[in-house]
Amino acid sequence: MGPGLLLRVHGLLRAPGLLWGRCRRAFSVRADGLLLRQLFEAKSCTYTYLLGDRATGEALLIDPVLDTASRDAQLVQELGLRLLYAVNTHCHADHVTGSGLLRSMIPGCKSVISRLSGAKADLFLEDGDILTFGRFALEARASPGHTDGCLTFVLSDHSAAFTGDALLIRGCGRTDFQQGCAKTLYHSVHEKIFTLPGDCLIYPAHDYQGHTVSTVEEERRLNPRLTLSCEDFIKVMNSLNLPKPTQIDMAVPANMRCGVQEPPS
């Protein structure tokens, strides 16, 4: 397999020649050489995740933010990694993605997003696609409901899932704009995320309470929204009356263009 190969094999959980770790706890570098760094952008309370293979140096970023793209690029360089992908879990409404800037700063880096997002990128993913970096791989699971183009990225040993806005720690993404649908989100989480092993770590795209990581079992038992019936979940989501995200008018159009903002008129 070539570096950073995208395997369009639906339902594939184990690929020949890839090494699957067995660690089931939060980690910085696993015993098998998988590196994970959780980075934070304070304005939008966004988590960006750097994953890398220590042996080969290949790496990817999940949900980079424009405001902190230079920080992320510097960390990649300091750790001696080669960034293959800047990956978006969906078209965010509360910040501008850093994927466009990162691909211009780092030769060989490609921007990635779901094909169903309608946004521009170098590489489009569908449900079941596999992204590899070195000896490791992520499976893309379609998890719409917050937006049509939401993806959850699952390490192929099912030890961790990067859930974007579909599943937050003790919460979930809102469903009142950007093709949102509460019923769709409920089924996405229950069918694509809650079916993972209970000790699978949950890493969301945002947190507003200071939490950094959860597990599938915790969220199955303790998530106040997603432990409801589907009918009651829909009622709760339809009655949230949340304020409009402050950056939405600027962020969504820019993110549809891979983070490129229109010059002021």
Image (spheres, helix red, strand yellow):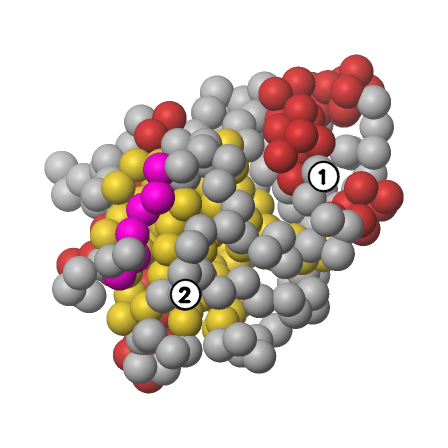
Residue 194 image label = 1
Residue at screen point 54% across, 63% down: 20
Location of the N terminus by quadrant is bottom left
Residue at screen point 41% across, 45% down: 130
Would you place residue 187 above or below residue 28 in this image? Answer: above
Q: Position of residue 103 (x, y in %)?
A: 21, 57
The residue pinned by badge 2 equals 135
CB contact under 8 Å: marks 2 and 1: no
**Is residue 67 visible to the viewer in this orientation of the structure?**
no
Distance between the Cα atoms at labels 2 and 1? 26 Å
Would you place residue 143 above or below residue 29 in this image? Answer: above
Between residue 223 and residue 54, name the one nearer to us: 54
Q: Is residue 232 left or right of residue 172?
A: right
| Residue type at tag 2 | Arg
Q: Quadrant of residue 83?
A: bottom left
**Secondary structure of the residue carrying numbered label 2:** loop
Magenta part of the chain = 3-8
Residue 45 on the magenta segment: no
